[in-house]
Image (spheres, rainbow, N blue to C red):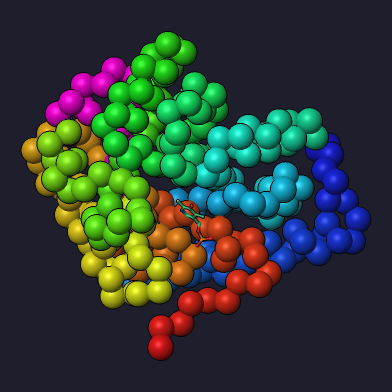
Amino acid sequence: MTMTTNSGAEGEALIRFLAERRAEILARVRAACARVGREASDVEVVCVTKGHPADEVAAAIAAGWTVFAENRVPELLQKKAELEERGLALPPFDMIGNLQTNKLKALVGEVRLVHSVASLHTARALSSRAEAAGIVQRVLLEVNVSGEATKQGFSQDELLEAAEELATLPALSIEGLMTMAPAGEPDVARETFRAARALKESLEARASLTLGQLSAGMSDDFEIAIEEGSTMVRLGRVALARSYEPFRAR
Ligand SMILES: *Cc1c(COP(=O)(O)O)cnc(C)c1O
């Protein structure tokens, strides 16, 4: 028996709502895969719980979600501790947010996969921290192919230049790329995902990296991302927020 504070009618209603959303999302993932001849099992859906309390994470677990992501280290650690206090078996968590060097020590060993390694400097620092902790950290390299100044990530040129050194970092297992598209522009999103996939392929051809994963697609653009080859979609609002309205291009 697991204990949560989601007992009672309110908790049951939340779990039912989240389970319905999850079923809709999985149906949309299957449909997007079918449109391009992919297997739905090749796309993992990661439930992004940033800004939601541990209670809601517990409800999301009860609703069937199995992999979670957070974008800030203190919030991640706090939520994991709260879930553990409740006696819940901890699900895997991923890190998807900007990595501050002074938080890497606390992060190492706490997450399944870091999606957001956005510079060579950060990659080196994370590898040293992981090495000191005696683990190999699984990571993705975040690329900024749309060139938006507000977004983190390696530019294409930076990544091609850094690839060989990245491949030699001893305590990182580099498993793919992550990217984010500009919001509200489906055509630009599609181009962004396509460019990230092309970059992944040219990196694999040129450097000693095997990049199986492409983490791409959020609430408003995950179907486009899947059509363009994403293997991991990171869903927050569409999975968890009652107020979420699907984005419709005008
Ligand atoms: C918040 C966040 C998401 C989820 O965004 P939604 O639009 O709510 O689905 C995905 N990836 C990253 C990096 C995020 O910070």
On screen, residue 89 versus residue 110, left or right, reads: right
177 in magenta = yes
User: Residue 75 at x, y = what percent?
Assistant: 63, 39
79 in magenta = no
In percent of the image, x 22 and y 36: which residue is there?
Answer: 210
Rendering quarter of residue 181:
bottom left
- Of all residues shown, which one is farthest toward the right? 8
67 w.r.t. 242: above or below: above
In percent of the image, x 19 and y 40: which residue is there?
Answer: 159
On screen, residue 192 versus residue 39, left or right, reads: left
User: Residue 230 at x, y = what percent?
Assistant: 33, 56
User: Residue 93 at x, y = what percent?
Assistant: 55, 38
Rendering quarter of residue 243:
bottom right
Q: Nearer the viewer, residue 55 or 188?
A: 188
- Of all residues shown, which one is farthest toward the left? 206
User: Residue 56 at x, y = what percent?
Assistant: 72, 51
52 w.r.t. 127: above or below: below
**Quadrant (top left, top right, bottom left, bottom right) of the N terminus:** top right
**Quadrant (top left, top right, bottom left, bottom right) of the C terminus:** bottom left
Q: Nearer the viewer, residue 56 or 119?
A: 119
Residues rendered magenta in the picture: 163-178
In percent of the image, x 17 and y 41: which residue is there?
Answer: 158
The answer to whether any part of residue 189 appears in the image is yes
Q: Nearer the viewer, residue 96 or 92?
A: 96
The answer to whether any part of residue 88 appears in the image is no
On screen, residue 17 versus residue 180, left or right, reads: right
In percent of the image, x 52 and y 44: which residue is there?
Answer: 71
